[in-house]
Image (cartoon, rainbow, N blue to C red):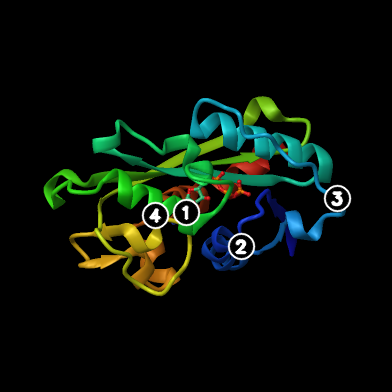
Amino acid sequence: MKKILFATNNQNKVKELRETLAKMGFELLTNRDLDNPPEVVENGRTFEDNAVLKAHALATYSNLPTIADDSGLMVDKLNGQPGVRSARYAGDHNDARNNAKLLAELGGVPTEKRTATFYSTIVVSYPGKFDQDLIVTGSTDGVITTIPQGENEFGYDPLFYIPEKKKTYAEMTVAEKNEISHRGKALKQITALLPGWLESVE
Ligand code: ITT
């Protein structure tokens, strides 16, 4: 099996990508499998900037083709916040505090004005070929609930409700979420493009 690195410390993201890449014949390694991987300062202005920072840093370190995802939630009523700062909205990667802050910021806002969009940018980089990055994006519209719903504990999932499915992301299985999610949509494009892209850069 060909090795590919997913430059992430987020095991929930790994769950959402692993099976698809395995079906394509890739063994998915992550930062956990590396000895002392570099910590990337995600100070880009956009999801793409940050995904590129992660993909390039870890491809250089590992010498492996490397996938990175940068994602976040843009809430209309909050002028697109938390956006690229989604992981650090109320505290560094503290999902409970981030969710509590989001609910507090939207206190008293009626359902029809609680609209939001989840975005994901996935970048795949090949060591030494950073001018040929593969870049895809996916987005999904939803509504921010007033109370958390669902068991799955990934980030804002319990607050992100999909009206067509009558479920939050946290009430979906990984497969159900991948069908409609921001990351799932980006991943579908990766599935289509990765084999040809790898051939062209290798
Ligand atoms: P990396 O190691 O991959 O950078 P991260 O958790 O820091 O992991 P990001 O920098 O992309 O990831 O931050 C995105 C934040 O947005 C993440 O911490 C979650 O809180 C949230 N998020 C992204 N995708 C999500 C999803 O599918 N469901 C729920 N929350 C999500």
In-image side of 47 versus 165 (left or right): right
Q: Nearer the viewer, mark 3 or mark 4?
A: 4
Label 2 Cα neighbours within 10 Å, binned few <14 / some 14-19 / many ≥20: few
User: 82 left or right of 78?
Assistant: right
Can residue 67 be seen here? The reply is: yes
Secondary structure beneath dot 2 equals helix
List x then y, in percent, for residue 60. 80, 37
Identify the residue under disc 1: 97
Q: Which mark is residue 36?
A: 3
Q: Are marks 3 and 1 in contact (CB under 8 Å)?
A: no
Separation of marks 4 and 2 at Cα, in angstroms: 22 Å
Decide which of tag 3 and tag 4 comes sooner along the chain: 3
In the rendered structure, find residue 16 and report the number of the disc placed on it.
none
Q: Residues within 10 Å of mark 4 (few under 14, many from 20)?
A: some
Which residue is found at the position 45% from the left and 50% from the top?
Answer: 98
Q: Measure how far apart labels 3 and 1 are at the Cα level.
A: 28 Å
Q: Which residue is mark 4?
A: 100
Residue 34: image x %, image y %?
82, 55
Q: CA distance from mark 2 to mark 3?
A: 17 Å
Disc 3 to disc 4, C-alpha distance: 33 Å
**Whether label 4 touches label 1, CB < 8 Å:** yes
Nearest to the observer: residue 154 or residue 89: 89
Quadrant of the rendered image containing residue 157 = bottom left
Report which residue position mark 2 lands on: 11
| Lower sequence index among marks 4 and 2 | 2
Q: Nearer the viewer, mark 3 or mark 1?
A: 1
Q: Is residue 188 visible?
A: no
The answer to the question of whether label 1 and label 2 lie on touching residues, with beta carbons closer than 8 A, is no
Check disc 2 and give the amino acid type.
Answer: Gln
